[in-house]
Image (cartoon, coloured by chain):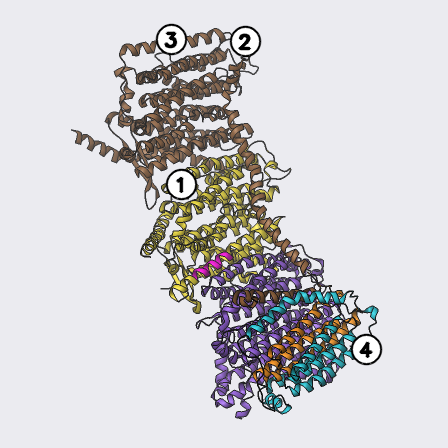
Chain colours: A yellow, B cyan, C purple, D brown, E orange
């Protein structure tokens, strides 16, 4: 039962992106147009996918092809209620990014657009892969376009930043690689065959040993870096600040979610026992991240860096939800991934406009922007509210569910995590107070206005922020069963392991 | 008994002249003392019934190769001032030998241990052992391939010398 | 007819030697203004060589059909029947071909004579073939010497360049010392085993324990070969020789020479000495670990691209040694194919890098500092992309060949479930993390730094360079998407071989 | 009989319960329309036409008021009727689902009517007050949004809905306080209000969450039915957490600091949000969760303690304020303290009663103040007023009634509700708090009449021309004054107390045990206190003339500094946090984490550089390494496998 | 009677003397001679083993080694001439342009 839909989704941007990349510079306009068309097609395709996928647990639209037979590596992709929304998020964000970047990226835009398509392919592949090797392949594929996009189109300090970013991420990846191989070899020693299939490896019975715990961390590290979890986060503020806004939009909006996704899809299903053993430590780090990110955001004097640290705080909350691993928190996590993407993404896009028009993002050089650009201010304020979890907007749903879920496993963690309510309001509103309100204070002769295409990329996000805050059903009806399924499989494995230990 | 004396003399000669070789400051005297070593070693070959190689060693090695070296030294005509200044050669060689002595000791112990439990006295052998005929038979029967390709090595050396030292247009 | 068939296994080797001599002769007889023909002929000869190699391989069935006595004669001291040898022959021929092609460009630019150069490459190739196929330690040693000698001379081929002199001198002197050590090891082995035939050694050690003298022999052999592959602490010649040698020869050393010696190492440790695995494995692990870390540490602080690549090749030696340490008697072990695959990818990527560098370094190889490559991508997008591709392949980014090379190698190493090797694998991964820094630095320099003025006076790229970059680049990508099993034969070529077989028989 | 009754109820609710949802939705709809209107006209310097906006902006609240009144009337006639309507599902997860569901029982009905009624009046007032402001349309958008959120808060049938409304009003409050955002101080006041409220919400949401995990319910009925199974610790924890929320919203100590600053917003906003409706949400919450607090005497005591402290402290601060709105703000805080005392003492109905009466007289006071400010062209200082009795007779009348009402002079509204609360305290034997309440009542009377005399008596001390209040101001003022005068009649002491009976189904019955004599005595005492307060104020401020000498001495300083709460928070919490944020990351991120990594790379480099020194180009050195390497290999090998080599 | 061990010892001694010469001396020429010394030591081992094992293969190997030594000598002499011509020095320590 093979469906080619997912493969189409992955390979369409991959191939077109690769082809467009090789076009000489004089085809820039064509490349941009073609990329936009492909991105739109992708989005439509993913919308159709939304219709196709049934709201039930387990993988659907599965495709499995033998790829490297002697190592039993298969091209294995599938989708479920969790990955569905990450696919939608990816395709939507890619489209919006391209629309936004149409005028924003001036130098060598064709290359940029093709790189975005490649990035999209990488992200889609990561989300849809069910074989660890395939997953790893796409996981790394995400990084390369990102590397070039930041390195070529980034800010003044782009070189040290991009180096830091890549070395951080690749270190995690390589540790992931060796861990995959360790797990594969463990499977090989138990069965005499190779397998890197996620659905098979999750049934592997691993003993309780420090080695397995080490392996667990090997599997988690790459994702925790991408996430990022305190103290692995220092690449984030630099990168978010130096990258072009549209890249930060993709980075914060989609790519960071891949870390969470990796934890949910790979690390924890493979090592449910180790997750239980280490959840206290990891949760503590997440809590530190929440509070630390928020406090540091409070002290920032630059817009992008402030939002970057707020992103750290939010992502730590999501991580906390993952580490507490119960249906409610997990549903919240999946939902909040989307929320955070929408809110933070939109904020970065807005800041991109500020950077372009005012030529500065230093808060002290800006003030009273609402006076000059009321629409901009309205959007910024709306997204700030979404970001701090005001009910009626999307952020609240996720935050509420995560807190609810966390509370069911630990009251004290929930109390600490709920501090985000206070702190996020503090830094975000203080920002709006200084940046949007007060007396007009902008670089002389500059005027802030949102161009039509930029507006076109922002409007969907605003609508989503409101829609997702009020009408959760189209999302929740898919997320719920998928999360249930993931959790119940985990439970089964834990029980089997407990029995195994009992007998052993 | 006789063999023992010969062995002792030749071995001493070889080692001593070897030491002299590496402590001479001028290459020419070093080369000449190397000739002595080579001849002494050739003598040891003879003691080991390697008749053919005894001849080869003296003719080819001590004769041809070293003659070539002497020739080159003369050709370059390096004056003693141009020689690298090496004060205290002997001390340095002695220190180096000291530095290498653990390694030597290791090899020596390995040899000793290897033959700890078995006799290392040489057994009697057939009369044609080591003769040209016997060696040649073996060379062309079992080692014809190696023999063929060693010619390539010599050719490479030839080409190399041309490539490195020939005057270019 | 039958007797002629006996000659078949030697055919590639014989032709390689013959072609080398032919180049020498043509050098003399072809007038100076037509010397360009030497290049074309050499390339033609190299192509013929690959074809002959395949044909010879295909006719192995006929040899197997021969009576045992004749077979022995045909195969004494020399074995060219298995996929292992075929793989290396073709790989070495390919590397030599690329070297020839870029050398043509290079020699013309540097105004250097061709004849001896080409013939030395052929002779080196012949030596490598011997190395790969030899069944006897003495034969093998001779092959090694042929290869080494040719390489020494090629390194010093730029006689007017003091660096080239110095490189050749250092390489040669240390090479002689290492050869002496290796030979001493062979001598000791001979004394213990009573034969230098590989199968004899194997069967001897199956029944006899390794004594102290045999151990010493083994250690000295390992050290000698360690020198040739550039394992730490025997690596010291590598950066100097790489830096001083003409660029194409640097590539040749980093690819063909290294591959040939690894072929030997795989063969020696995989066949005659495999039974002694417990004795040598720790040494190899130690060498491997030292090699990786030292190479990495030194590669990071280099500013000269040739030296950086030299240390990078040392790091890859470390990884390969890790694979060698996993050679075992397990029947289903695929470590050999993993090693071969790694070598294949490494050779192809490295060749690609040197193709690009030969072109970019300019007359007199003036451009050697990494910083000189700033902003290359703006005016040389294709070359820059190729270089970036190879760097990413070295790092092991999927879906490039380098990734699967690492993947198979590590998976085979880990499969033994040996704690020592597991530890080494982890160490190796940590090392690859370190290695990101300097590979990335080149890419960053090429793409993100402001354009260096020298790239503005763009020199047009010869077709041969473009072609080679394209081919090596495509192979690097292709091997990532469709990695294949190299055990026994190059399966990528299987259909082709089947077809040829049908024609021949 | 009973069945029949129930059937009719059901029938009616089936027919018209969707109207309940409409009550909530209408203001939201208005906000949406106005919002789009605002955005569409953003380029236009003038903004959308004031008439259209005013009409639309008032129509929706008015319609909601009519609907609410209609439903409430049904309730009045039907007795036990509880309206219920589920509008839509909001969140369905695998463990629970939450709906946008509304419930209108006697409590929320009363509140809804009051809110929509007062809200409409204030909308009307605002048309006049905001005339000519550039943000006219924006203002009405926010106001409608606020009303919708407030109704959602009141009418939701579950805690999550309540919380959404709760936060929604917080946002609107933020937007409206900072309405004139060009002034950094005003924008800052909005931020402060929201953040302080968030501290409360922090507790609130945790309370909701813990309540859910212990009862598996979000809706009130479900929670009420499951509450019995909880342990006292759980009950106390949850009650405390919910209380934190209430403290924030209702500006009780220690979270009261935001309310005085909130006066930065337009005055009608202060009337609506920061006096009549939003700030009483905390009281509503406690009354709504009365079944919880009834089970938790210790937290109830805490409420009384906080309430009485707040009432007293705020009243004392109000003594020295010279800004008309600040006086009213502290008075609001103080009155909210009363309400807390009431609900803390278990007299939920009395608390709500005070909410109800307070809404009228405080709204009237604020609007009156608004009218004054409007007519004095945004002059807020009491020192620059005076003698307005003649110039603004309507406002003066309204203000006088309201001041009397708040001072607790019978038969005006404040007297009865305050008395109920004091009675409840007396009844419970909480004499200390009763005394505090009484003192506060005296203080209230004093500072309110201080305000009154400074504004209306004597001569005009300002410079600017005094204009007259337009009709659109007089109308709401008049209506509110009527409310302020008569609302108290709903809760006459003793058995005539209608409101107590009305609320009994929702918040439980509370029957004072004190004898009529005692009740009478208590009333007399409180009236006496109020009278004394008024008397002192009259003697001191009737003929006030400049210059004003601010009171000095340690006590006065303390009052001027508002007991130092703001300074304390600023210096102990806010500034250190900002400093931490400003510099903390350079230490943690740059120094520690990046520093560790940099140190790592540095070590890596230094190792590389030192190895580079070993590779110094000398052939002999290389040869040494080579030989030493071989030796080490051999040595290790023999040590490991054949140590006998080393034994001589 | 001197046995295998004695010959091997002499051989080892010569080998290490050669090695010492190689690493202790700065004169390129003498370093070459030291290599020759080492090769001779190895040859002696081969022949001793050959005698001990009573087979002639060792002799063949020595034969080959002499050939190899000859070609090495040729190359080395060519190199010496080249280096001396270019740099006018036989001091090995002078060749350190490339390092690091």
Q: Position of residue A156 (x, y in %)?
A: 63, 48
Q: Are marks 1 and 4 in contact (CB under 8 Å)?
A: no
Q: Are marks 4 and 2 in contact (CB under 8 Å)?
A: no
Residue interval drawn in magenta: A174-184
Q: Disc 1 versus disc 3: distance between alpha carbons? A: 52 Å
Q: Disc 4 versus disc 2: distance between alpha carbons? A: 126 Å
The dot on residue D545 is 2
Indicate the chain on which mark 2 is placed: D
The dot on residue C412 is none
Q: Residue at x 56, y 10 (%)?
A: D546
- Residue farthest left in this picture: D1
Horizontal side of E54 relative to A481 (left or right) equals right
Q: Are marks 1 and 3 in contact (CB under 8 Å)?
A: no
Whether discs 4 and 2 lie on one chain: the answer is: no
Of residues C326 and B115, the one drawn nearer to the viewer in this rendering: B115
Q: Examine the rendered structure and indicate whether residue A382 appears above or below residue C137.
A: above
Looking at the magenta stretch, what is its main secondary structure? Answer: helix
Does D154 appear in magenta?
A: no
Q: Residue at x 33, y 27 (%)?
A: D287
Q: Disc 1 versus disc 4: distance between alpha carbons? A: 92 Å
Q: Disc 3 versus disc 4: distance between alpha carbons? A: 134 Å
Q: Position of residue D250 (x, y in %)?
A: 41, 26
The dot on residue D528 is 3
Q: Disc 3 versus disc 2: distance between alpha carbons? A: 28 Å
Whether discs 1 and 3 lie on one chain: the answer is: no
The dot on residue B74 is 4
Q: Quadrant of residue C242?
A: bottom right
- Residue farthest bottom in this picture: C1
Horizontal side of A170 relative to D486 (left or right) equals right
Q: Which residue is mark 1?
A: A403
């Amino acid at each position: 039962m093979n469906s080619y839909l997912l493969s189409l989704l992955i390979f369409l941007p991959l191939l077109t992106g690769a082809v467009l990349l090789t076009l000489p510079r004089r085809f820039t306009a064509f490349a941009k147009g073609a990329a936009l068309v492909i991105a739109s097609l992708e989005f439509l395709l993913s919308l159709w996918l939304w219709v196709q996928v049934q709201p039930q647990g387990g993988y659907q639209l599965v495709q499995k092809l033998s790829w490297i037979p002697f190592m039993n590596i298969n091209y294995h992709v599938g989708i479920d209620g969790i990955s569905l929304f990450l696919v939608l998020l990816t395709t939507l964000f890619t489209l919006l990014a391209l629309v936004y970047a149409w005028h924003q990226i001036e130098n060598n835009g064709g290359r940029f657009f093709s790189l975005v398509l490649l990035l999209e392919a990488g992200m889609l592949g990561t989300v849809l892969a069910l074989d660890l090797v395939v997953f790893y392949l796409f996981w790394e594929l995400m990084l390369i376009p990102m590397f070039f996009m930041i390195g070529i189109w980034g800010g003044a300090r782009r070189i040290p930043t991009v180096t830091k970013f890549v070395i951080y991420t690749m270190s995690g990846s390589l540790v992931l690689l060796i861990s995959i191989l360790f797990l594969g070899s463990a499977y090989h020693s138990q069965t005499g065959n190779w397998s890197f299939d996620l659905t098979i490896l999750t049934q592997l019975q691993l003993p309780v040993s420090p080695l397995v715990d080490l392996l667990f961390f090997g599997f988690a590290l790459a994702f925790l870096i991408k996430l990022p979890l305190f103290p692995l986060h220092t690449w984030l503020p630099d990168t978010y600040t130096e990258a072009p806004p549209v890249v930060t939009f993709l980075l914060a909006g989609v790519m960071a979610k891949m870390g969470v996704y990796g934890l949910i899809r790979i690390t924890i299903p493979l090592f449910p026992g180790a997750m239980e053993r280490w959840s206290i430590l990891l949760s503590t780090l997440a809590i530190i991240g929440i509070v630390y990110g928020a406090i540091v955001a409070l002290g920032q004097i630059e817009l992008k860096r402030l939002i970057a640290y707020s992103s750290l705080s939010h992502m730590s909350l999501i991580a906390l939800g993952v580490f507490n691993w119960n249906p409610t928190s997990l549903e919240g996590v999946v939902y909040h991934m989307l929320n955070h993407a929408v809110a933070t993404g939109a904020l970065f896009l807005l800041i991109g406009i500020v950077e372009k028009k005012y030529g500065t993002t230093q808060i002290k050089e800006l003030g009273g922007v609402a006076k000059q650009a009321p629409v901009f201010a309205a959007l910024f304020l709306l997204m700030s509210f979404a970001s701090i979890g005001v009910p009626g907007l999307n952020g609240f749903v996720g935050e509420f569910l995560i807190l609810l879920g966390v509370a069911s496993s630990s009251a004290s963690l929930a109390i600490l995590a709920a501090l985000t309510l206070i702190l996020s309001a503090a830094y975000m509103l203080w920002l709006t107070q200084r940046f949007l309100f007060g007396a007009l204070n902008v670089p002389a002769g500059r005027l802030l206005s949102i161009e039509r295409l930029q507006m076109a990329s922002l409007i969907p996000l605003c609508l989503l922020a409101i829609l997702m805050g009020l009408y959760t059903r189209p999302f929740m009806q898919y997320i719920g069963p998928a999360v249930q399924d993931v959790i119940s499989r985990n439970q089964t494995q834990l029980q089997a392991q407990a029995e195994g230990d009992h007998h052993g | 008994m006789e063999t023992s004396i010969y062995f002792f003399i030749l071995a001493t000669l070889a080692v001593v002249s070897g030491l002299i070789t590496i402590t001479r400051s001028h290459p020419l005297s070093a080369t000449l003392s190397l000739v002595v070593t080579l001849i002494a070693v050739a003598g040891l070959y003879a003691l080991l019934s390697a008749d053919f190689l005894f001849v080869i060693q003296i003719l080819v090695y001590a004769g041809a190769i070293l003659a070539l070296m002497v020739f080159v030294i003369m050709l370059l005509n390096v004056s003693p001032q141009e020689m690298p200044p090496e004060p205290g050669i002997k001390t340095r060689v002695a220190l180096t030998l000291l530095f290498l002595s653990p390694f030597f000791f290791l090899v020596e112990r390995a040899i000793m241990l290897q033959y700890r439990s078995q006799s290392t006295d040489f057994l009697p052998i057939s009369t044609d052992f080591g003769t040209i005929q016997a060696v040649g038979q073996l060379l062309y029967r079992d080692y014809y391939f190696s023999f063929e390709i060693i010619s390539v090595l010599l050719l490479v050396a030839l080409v190399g010398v041309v490539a490195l030292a020939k005057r270019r247009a | 007819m039958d007797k002629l068939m006996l000659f078949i296994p030697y055919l590639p080797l014989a032709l390689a030697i013959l072609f080398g001599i032919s180049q020498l002769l043509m050098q003399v007889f072809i007038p100076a203004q037509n010397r360009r023909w030497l290049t074309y002929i050499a390339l033609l000869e190299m192509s013929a060589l690959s074809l002959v190699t395949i044909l010879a391989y295909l006719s192995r069935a006929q040899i197997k059909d021969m009576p045992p006595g004749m077979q022995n004669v045909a195969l004494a001291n020399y074995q060219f029947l298995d996929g292992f040898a075929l793989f290396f022959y073709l790989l070495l021929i390919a590397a030599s071909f690329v070297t020839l092609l870029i050398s043509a460009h290079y020699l013309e630019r540097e105004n250097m004579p061709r004849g001896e150069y080409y013939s030395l490459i052929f002779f080196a190739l012949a030596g490598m073939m011997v190395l790969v196929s030899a069944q006897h330690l003495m034969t093998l040693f001779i092959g090694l010497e042929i290869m080494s000698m040719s390489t020494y001379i090629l390194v010093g081929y730029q006689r007017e360049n003091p660096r080239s002199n110095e490189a050749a001198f250092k390489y040669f002197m240390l090479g002689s010392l290492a050869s002496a050590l290796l030979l001493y090891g062979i001598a000791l082995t001979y004394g213990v085993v009573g034969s230098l035939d590989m199968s004899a050694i194997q069967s001897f050690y199956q029944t006899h324990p390794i004594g102290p003298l045999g151990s010493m022999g083994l250690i000295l052999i390992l050290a000698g070969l360690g020198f040739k592959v550039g394992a730490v602490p025997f690596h010291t010649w590598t950066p100097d020789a790489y830096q001083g040698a003409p660029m194409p020869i640097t590539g040749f050393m980093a690819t063909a020479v290294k591959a040939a010696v690894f072929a030997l190492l795989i063969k020696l440790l995989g066949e005659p000495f495999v039974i002694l695995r417990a004795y040598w494995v720790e040494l190899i692990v130690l060498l491997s670990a030292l090699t990786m870390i030292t190479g990495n540490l030194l590669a990071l602080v280099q500013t000269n691209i040739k030296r950086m690549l030299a240390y990078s090749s040392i790091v890859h030696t470390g990884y390969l040694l890790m694979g060698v340490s996993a050679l075992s008697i397990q029947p289903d072990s695929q470590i050999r194919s993993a090693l071969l695959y790694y070598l294949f990818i490494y050779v192809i990527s490295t060749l690609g890098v040197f193709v690009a560098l030969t072109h970019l370094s300019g007359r007199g190889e003036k451009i050697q500092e990494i910083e000189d490559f700033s902003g290359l991508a703006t005016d040389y997008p294709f070359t820059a992309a190729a270089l970036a591709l190879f760097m990413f392949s070295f790092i092991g980014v999927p879906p490039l060949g380098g990734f699967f090379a690492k993947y198979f190698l590590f998976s085979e190493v880990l499969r033994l479930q040996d704690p020592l090797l597991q530890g080494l694998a982890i160490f190796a991964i940590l090392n690859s993390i370190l290695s990101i820094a300097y590979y990335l630095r080149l890419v960053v320099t090429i793409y993100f730094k402001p354009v260096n003025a020298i790239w503005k006076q763009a020199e047009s790229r010869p077709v041969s360079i473009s072609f080679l970059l394209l081919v090596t680049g495509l192979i690097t990508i292709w091997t990532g998407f469709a990695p294949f099993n190299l055990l026994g034969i190059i399966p990528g070529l299987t259909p082709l071989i089947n077809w040829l077989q049908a024609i021949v028989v | 009989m009973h069945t029949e009754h129930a059937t009719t109820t059901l029938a009616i609710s089936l027919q018209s319960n969707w109207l309940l949802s409409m009550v909530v939705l209408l203001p939201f709809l208005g906000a949406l329309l106005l919002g789009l209107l605002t955005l569409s006209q953003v380029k236009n310097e003038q903004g959308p036409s004031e008439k259209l906006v005013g009409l639309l902006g008032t129509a929706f609240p008015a319609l909601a008021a009519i609907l609410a009144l209609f439903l409430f009337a049904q309730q009045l006639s039907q007795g036990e009727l509880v309206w219920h309507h589920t509008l839509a599902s909001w969140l369905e997860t695998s463990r629970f689902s939450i709906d946008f569901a509304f419930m209108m029982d006697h409590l929320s009905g009363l509140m809804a009517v009051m809110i929509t009624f007062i809200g409409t009046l204030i909308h009307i007032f605002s048309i006049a007050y905001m005339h000519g402001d550039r943000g006219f349309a924006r203002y009405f958008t926010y106001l409608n949004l606020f009303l919708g959120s407030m109704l959602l808060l009141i009418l939701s049938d579950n805690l999550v809905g309540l919380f959404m409304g709760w936060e929604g009003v917080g946002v609107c409050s933020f937007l409206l306080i900072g309405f004139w955002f060009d002034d950094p101080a005003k924008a800052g006041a909005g931020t402060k209000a929201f953040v302080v409220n968030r501290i409360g919400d922090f507790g609130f949401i945790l309370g909701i969450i813990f309540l859910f995990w212990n009862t598996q319910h979000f809706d009130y009925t479900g929670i009420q039915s499951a509450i019995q199974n909880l342990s006292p610790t759980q009950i106390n924890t949850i009650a405390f957490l919910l209380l934190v929320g209430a403290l924030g919203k209702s500006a009780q100590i220690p979270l009261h600091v935001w309310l005085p600053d909130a006066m930065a917003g337009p005055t009608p906003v202060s009337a609506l949000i920061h006096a009549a409706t939003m700030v009483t949400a905390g009281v509503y919450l406690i009354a709504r969760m009365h079944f919880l607090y009834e089970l938790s005497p210790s937290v109830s005591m805490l409420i009384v303690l906080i309430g009485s402290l707040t009432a007293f402290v705020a009243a004392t601060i109000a003594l020295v304020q010279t800004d008309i709105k600040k006086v009213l703000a502290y008075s609001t805080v103080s009155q909210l303290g009363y309400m807390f005392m009431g609900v803390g003492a278990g007299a939920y109905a009395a608390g709500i009663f005070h909410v109800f009466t307070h809404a009228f007289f405080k709204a009237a006071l604020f609007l009156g103040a608004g009218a004054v400010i409007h007519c004095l062209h945004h002059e807020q200082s009491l020192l620059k007023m005076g003698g307005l009795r003649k110039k603004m007779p309507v406002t003066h009348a309204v203000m006088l009634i309201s001041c009397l009402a708040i001072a607790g002079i019978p038969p005006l509204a404040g007297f009865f509700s305050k008395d109920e609360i004091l009675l409840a305290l007396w009844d419970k034997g909480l004499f200390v708090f009763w005394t505090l309440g009484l003192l506060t009542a005296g203080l209230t009377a004093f500072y309110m009449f201080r305000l009154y005399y400074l504004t209306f008596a004597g001569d005009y001390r300002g410079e600017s021309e005094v204009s007259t209040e337009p009709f659109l101001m007089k109308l709401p003022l008049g209506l509110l004054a009527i409310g302020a005068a008569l609302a108290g009649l709903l809760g006459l002491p003793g058995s005539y107390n209608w409101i107590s009976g009305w609320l009994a189904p929702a918040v439980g019955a509370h029957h004072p045990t004190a004898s009529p004599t005692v009740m009478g005595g208590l009333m007399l005492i409180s009236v006496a206190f109020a009278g004394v307060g008024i008397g002192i104020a009259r003697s001191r401020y009737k003929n006030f003339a400049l210059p004003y000498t601010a009171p000095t001495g340690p006590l006065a300083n303390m009052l001027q500094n508002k007991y130092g709460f703001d300074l304390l928070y600023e210096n102990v919490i806010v500034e250190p946090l900002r400093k931490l944020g400003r510099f903390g990351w350079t230490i943690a991120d740059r120094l520690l984490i990046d520093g560790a990594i940099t140190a790592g790379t540095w070590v890596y480099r230094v190792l590389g550089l030192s190895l580079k020194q070993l590779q110094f180009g000398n052939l002999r050195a290389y040869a040494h390494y080579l030989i030493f390497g071989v030796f080490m290999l051999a040595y290790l090998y023999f040590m490991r496998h054949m140590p006998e080599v080393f034994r001589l | 009677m001197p046995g295998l061990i004695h010959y091997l010892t002499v051989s080892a001694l010569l080998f290490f003397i050669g090695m010492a010469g190689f690493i202790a001396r700065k004169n390129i020429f003498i370093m070459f001679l030291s290599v020759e010394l080492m090769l001779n030591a190895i040859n002696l081992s081969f022949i001793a083993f050959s005698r001990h094992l009573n087979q002639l293969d060792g002799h063949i190997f020595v034969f080959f080694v002499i050939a190899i030594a000859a070609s090495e000598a040729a190359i080395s002499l060519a190199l010496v001439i080249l280096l001396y011509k270019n740099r006018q020095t036989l001091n090995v320590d002078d060749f350190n342009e490339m390092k690091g």
